[in-house]
Image: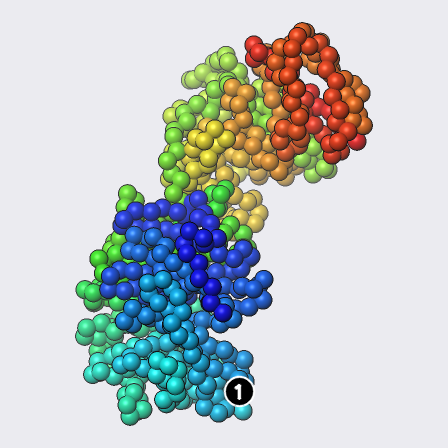
């Protein structure tokens, strides 16, 4: 079954951190079917610069393997997409464009006589189905298809063959058919017990070349060969062989340049405590080794590369893409470019983030050079940065240097689309409030507010503001914590009289990869943190502020202390002082909300309702509103401190307004909350002159 959807009907979501568009570059993610993983598996580019992609999905209420076919213009405009149901696309090279028709390769693989391969042909103009076909295998064989290749008007499906009658033996297999699916002939290629064919493509002398792997059932080490295949006579010849290949880390890929092959390889080698991530070798068309480049890294770096694609450029450069795993355990899509002699031209790693600044796992499984020299790649990106999170289809287009317009061209490229934050210079301003929740190991929960004084206190070489604390929800009584802070540029310092020492607790000028040493009198030893991500946080008023994610060097996976998330002008999202309190085992703090001039700019909706202070100055309780009975079953009387003109509102624990009432010279108001759900509610009264009274009531 085929379902056609115009782009304006497509149910996709652009993730806010990864969507950026221009005539030169773009990055977009698509989530067609919620809960289904949607990795990008195959791609083709036309001479006009149109981009065709295949994304594997699970459709029909997550019961059937399907494919989603996209067509994008050179500028990234989605022209159409087509869902093909009940057909599983082959794993890798599964799409080609021939004479305004799009050929999608499919295969059924159950290791039984009912298996087949086939294809669907789509119209380039609108994505409508023109034809579909299936082709059965010779008796006793089945095919785990890796790809399709169209050559001289014939279709070649290739991959690992399976001998249905002898599961201990499987040939590399090429299935040849015409464009209507009629079987023509096939190749069974055997070197060892188990064999497979990767990357079938046109080679020199008008013959086909393929990469074959072979292994016995006694080892996980594979041998690989570049093989020339005469499709007319069926004869094969090994051009170049790699033995003892370590494919569990990096599978070999090869490409054909104008005068040579280039092939990746991964040996079992070590050199002075270094690990070989991968090697690339240049090989002549007659099989002579020309050059080799190797990427060695320190063993303790914990870095690794998974190669997923290799392709050529018009100037005889070649490109590799896949997934890079960094020191912190993040898995990142990458592209690397080499020239024809194996010289590294550049490497780019494309970091993307979820809504709270965590790095999303991603990879780039296919890439092509565009007619204008730019590069387009597809793959997968997590929707949120969590283990096992759903993956969305990701398409990325960059310039010929691997960068995006307006980006500083360096190894690590950060795609979040949300870096237009303003600089907020005064964290210690007295108009700021932090409402926090603290939980002890015994389960005791405390709710309190922090604010800074509007007066200065002298220190040894500077003047400071005192940090004040209030433990009532109106902020009617404030006490000093005895702690002094100052800000210089984008750095925040705490000062102690006891040892006449300043301690730096924040530095919002840090850049990605920078180290921050946390030296504080409450810590038994210094802690070193690295900035692992930078983007921006959108606040309630629509403004954006710089957000930094930091991780302790002694906790590379974040499992012990977790990440610290700093927002400029606000501080740590776990609490103003959590920058060092994270290391103290007796309490866990969380920032409930942050306010400026009584306006809530940030709120953690999972923790409850913000306390709304009236002022740092003391407010007499007799001037507050009074509620009775409290708790109540529904009927509530509210005593106001004076004749009030204004408005009364009732909010639930999510902050949603559930009732309002205008006040006209009122001293007492009655409410009926019996229709509301049981729980806590906030009663707020605001007068015409701006006076505000807040109280809580429990409905049971």
Q: Quadrant of residue 642?
A: top right
The residue under the point 65% across, 10% down is 664
Residue at the image position 39 percent from the left and 87 percent from the top: 183
Residue placed at 24% from the left, 64% from the top? Answer: 47
Q: Between residues 467 and 652, which one lies in front from this camera angle? A: 652
Residue 472 drawn at (x, y percent): 67, 21
Residue 409 can be seen, yes or no:
no
Residue at 50 percent of width and 63 percent of height? 57
Residue 229 drawn above or below residue 590: below
Residue 641 as seen in the image, left or right of residue 61: right
Looking at the picture, how far across and down is residue 459, in whole percent?
Answer: 47, 16
**How did the renderer colour the structure?**
rainbow
Q: In x, y percent, where is residue 349? A: 36, 54
Nearer to the camera, 429 or 456:
429
- Residue indicated by mark 1: 113
Work out whether residue 315 can be spotted.
yes
438 w.r.t. 456: above or below: below
Residue in front for this viewpoint, 347 or 74: 74
Residue 56 placement (x, y as % from top left): 47, 65
Side (left or right) of 600 relative to 537: right
The secondary element bearing badge 1 is classed as: loop
């Amino acid at each position: 079954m085929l379902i056609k959807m115009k782009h304006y009907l497509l149910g996709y979501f652009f993730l806010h951190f990864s969507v950026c568009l221009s005539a030169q570059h773009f990055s977009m993610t698509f989530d067609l079917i919620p809960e289904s993983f949607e990795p990008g598996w195959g791609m083709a580019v036309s001479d006009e610069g149109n981009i065709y992609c295949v994304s594997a999905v699970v459709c029909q209420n997550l019961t059937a393997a399907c494919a989603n076919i996209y067509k994008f213009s050179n500028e990234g405009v989605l022209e159409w997409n087509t869902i093909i149901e009940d057909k599983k696309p082959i794993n890798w090279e599964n799409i080609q464009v021939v004479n305004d028709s799009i050929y999608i390769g499919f295969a059924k693989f159950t290791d039984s006589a009912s298996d087949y391969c086939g294809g669907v042909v789509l119209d380039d103009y609108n994505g409508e189905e023109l034809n579909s076909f299936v082709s059965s295998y010779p008796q006793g064989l089945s095919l785990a298809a890796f790809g399709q290749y169209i050559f001289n008007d014939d279709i070649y499906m290739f991959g690992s063959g399976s001998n249905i009658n002898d599961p201990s033996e499987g040939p590399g297999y090429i299935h040849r058919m015409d464009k209507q699916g009629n079987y023509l002939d096939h190749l069974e290629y055997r070197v060892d017990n188990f064999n497979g064919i990767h990357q079938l493509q046109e080679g020199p002398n008008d013959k086909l070349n393929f990469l074959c792997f072979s292994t016995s059932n006694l080892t996980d080490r594979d041998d690989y060969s570049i093989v020339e295949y005469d499709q007319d006579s069926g004869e094969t010849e090994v051009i170049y062989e790699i033995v003892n290949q370590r494919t569990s880390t990096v599978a070999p890929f090869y490409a054909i340049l104008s005068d040579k092959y280039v092939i990746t390889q991964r040996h079992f080698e070590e050199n002075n405590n270094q690990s070989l991530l991968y090697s690339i070798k240049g090989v002549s068309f007659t099989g002579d080794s020309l050059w080799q480049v190797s990427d060695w890294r320190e063993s303790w770096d914990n870095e690794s590369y998974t190669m997923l694609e290799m392709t050529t450029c018009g100037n005889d450069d070649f490109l590799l893409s896949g997934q890079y795993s960094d020191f912190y355990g993040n898995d990142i899509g990458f592209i690397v470019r080499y020239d024809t002699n194996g010289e590294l031209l550049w490497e780019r790693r494309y970091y993307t983030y979820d809504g709270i600044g965590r790095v999303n796992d991603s990879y780039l499984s296919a890439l092509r050079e565009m007619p204008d020299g730019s590069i387009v790649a597809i793959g997968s990106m997590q929707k949120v940065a969590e283990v096992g999170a759903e993956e969305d289809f990701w398409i990325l287009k960059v310039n010929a240097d691997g960068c995006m317009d307006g980006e500083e061209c360096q190894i690590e490229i950060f795609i979040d689309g949300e870096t237009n934050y303003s600089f907020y210079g005064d964290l210690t301003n007295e108009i700021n409030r932090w409402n926090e929740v603290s939980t002890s190991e015994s389960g005791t929960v405390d709710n309190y507010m922090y604010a800074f004084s509007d007066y200065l206190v002298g220190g040894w070489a500077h003047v400071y503001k005192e940090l004040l604390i209030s433990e009532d929800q109106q902020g009617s009584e404030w006490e000093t914590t005895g702690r002094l802070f100052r800000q210089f540029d984008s750095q925040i310092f705490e000062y102690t009289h006891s040892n006449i020492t300043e301690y730096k607790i924040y530095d919002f000028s840090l850049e990605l990869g920078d180290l921050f040493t946390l030296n504080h009198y409450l810590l038994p030893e210094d802690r070193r943190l690295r900035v692992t991500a930078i983007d921006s946080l959108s606040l309630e008023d629509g403004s954006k502020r710089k957000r930094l994610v930091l991780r302790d060097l002694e906790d590379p996976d974040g499992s012990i202390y977790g990440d610290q998330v700093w927002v400029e002008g606000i501080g740590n999202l776990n609490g103003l002082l959590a920058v060092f309190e994270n290391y103290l085992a007796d309490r866990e703090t969380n920032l409930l909300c942050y306010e400026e001039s009584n306006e809530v700019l940030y709120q953690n909706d999972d923790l409850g309702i913000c306390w709304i202070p009236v002022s740092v100055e003391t407010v007499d309780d007799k001037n507050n509103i009074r509620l009775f009975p409290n708790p109540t079953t529904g009927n509530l009387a509210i005593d106001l401190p004076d004749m009030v003109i204004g408005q009364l509102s009732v909010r639930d624990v999510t902050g949603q307004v559930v009732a309002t009432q205008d006040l006209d010279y009122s001293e007492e108001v009655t409410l009926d909350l019996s229709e509301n759900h049981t729980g806590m509610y906030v009663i707020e009264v605001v007068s015409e002159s701006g006076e505000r009274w807040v109280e809580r009531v429990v409905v049971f």
